[in-house]
Image (cartoon, rainbow, N blue to C red):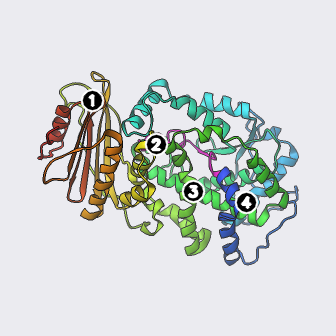
Amino acid sequence: MNNNRIVLSFVIILAVACFCLAAVLAVSGGVFFLAGDRLNSFFPSATPTYTPPTVTPTPATPTQAPSSMGSTATPNGQGEKDLPPGIARQMDRIQEQVASIRSLELPPTVNRALLSVDQLRQQVESDFFKDYNQQDVEDDVRVLAAFGLLEPDYDLYSLYLDLYTEQIAGYYDLETDEMFVVIDTGFSGPQRSTYSHEFTHALQDYNHNVRDGMNYNEDYCETDSEYCAAIQALIEGDASLTEQSWLYLYGTDLDRKEIDEYYQNNDLSVFDTAPAFLQEDFIFPYLQGVDFVLALFEEGGFARIDEAYGDPPVSTEQILHPERYPDDRPVPVDLPDLSNALGRELRELDRGVMGEWYTYLILARGARQASQIPDDQAAPATEGWGGDSYAVYWDEAAGQPVVVLSTIWDSEGEAQEFYTAFRAYGTANWGAPVQTRGTDELNWDSAGDGASVFIRTGAQTLWVVAPTSADVQLLLQSLSVSESVGAR
């Protein structure tokens, strides 16, 4: 399932939520206050400016020459050679300012383009979704629905298309090294701030080789999506903090006024109507990512953040709990191939690591509000996560999913806390469980919805879902669980 959360993010670094979040924080005094309070410690010679920046590029210096922009025309929108000179000069200036803030070397070439909202939608449809076919959508919905995060008939494709079209303010394409800014209303405060964020991604990739050196790419993310979720939080948190630093040091009063007006009038209806878990998951790299990089920033400024690219976070647990970075690494958990465990064909839809973040979302942000357990129970119950492995299959004959989630907790007490929380979650979803006497084993057999068992053994928990109770027993046997499933 973690694969699904970045299915549209591993190729491009999007500003779906970061720009909106950053603007709100800047206006309300969040990150802007934190950056402003500490920037003088790291840039003692810097003085914030509130006058419009000159449109004349700063002369080159021996160590940081201005970027030589490419002129490759893009399929849609205005390519580099078509950029209005005034906008191109502003972009050059912002690039130099951002590189100065981050003390990173400017890349020799970055292709830039401007898009209208209509052109962006065409690009999303033709490029971003070209490898995301109807079967992929159907499988994603089945996986997410199996964990209670989506209704089985949810139109996920339309949501992605609308959300990625309407909420992108700009993005940097790691595959093509191209940077795009949506500019229907001109290159004003919102676009300038977005540009500082997105150019940070170009600096990250050039200086830290994010795509290839750090394996933040489609192929690797298919096999280790929990790692990629952590990397995404690092790079988006870094870019968001850099954006706020740029706004503090170089943004104008007019920039702030235009940003405030933009978001006063911005239509967030698509995002507001998205499933609860998806709303939270979209902003995870920006909200929790900012918290993570701020913890690093407080240790040693942007230099400490740069060090993290050489020893990156590997789990959402480390993002949620920066004090656990870099030493607390996930415990590997193996699951066998269960495609023949029921004596009939099961098609594997997905397997991977759920991670602390998605384990929390399952408990607290299910598709049905009545099944969501309170945050003050769900968050503490998942904080003791140590490692896991999950697999989801589709039983074509039954038309239902088969789910296995095996989790290792930091201690037996942490496993017990999750067991208690899961009991509340299961009761809200399927009614009171049948508990095997003398054991931590919970059983549900909901007519039409399949059977489910949840077992705690020491510091480990196991959740199995299958069409029938007999199927659950067969799966437990294949998993070498000696305890039989209790009476139902």
Which of pointers 3 and 1 lies earlier in the amino acid sequence? Answer: 3
- Residue at image mark 4: 27
How many other residues sit within 10 Å of disc 2, few (<14), some (14-19) or many (≥20)? Answer: few
Which of pointers 2 and 1 lies earlier in the amino acid sequence? Answer: 2
Alpha carbon distance from label 1 to label 4:
52 Å
Residue in view at x 79 percent, y 61 percent? 251
Alpha carbon distance from label 2 to label 1:
21 Å
Which of pointers 4 and 3 lies earlier in the amino acid sequence? Answer: 4
Alpha carbon distance from label 2 to label 4:
32 Å
Q: Is residue 293 above or below residue 404?
A: below
Which of pointers 2 and 3 lies earlier in the amino acid sequence? Answer: 3
Alpha carbon distance from label 3 to label 1:
40 Å
Give the residue type at disc 4.
Val
- Residue at image mark 3: 287
Between marks 3 and 1 in the image, the one whose residue lies nearer the viewer: 1
Q: Secondary structure beneath disc 3? A: helix
Residue stretch rendered in magenta on the structure: 1-18
User: What is the number of the mark on residue 447?
Assistant: 1
How many other residues sit within 10 Å of disc 3, few (<14), some (14-19) or many (≥20)? Answer: many
How many other residues sit within 10 Å of disc 4, few (<14), some (14-19) or many (≥20)? Answer: some
Which of pointers 1 and 4 lies earlier in the amino acid sequence? Answer: 4
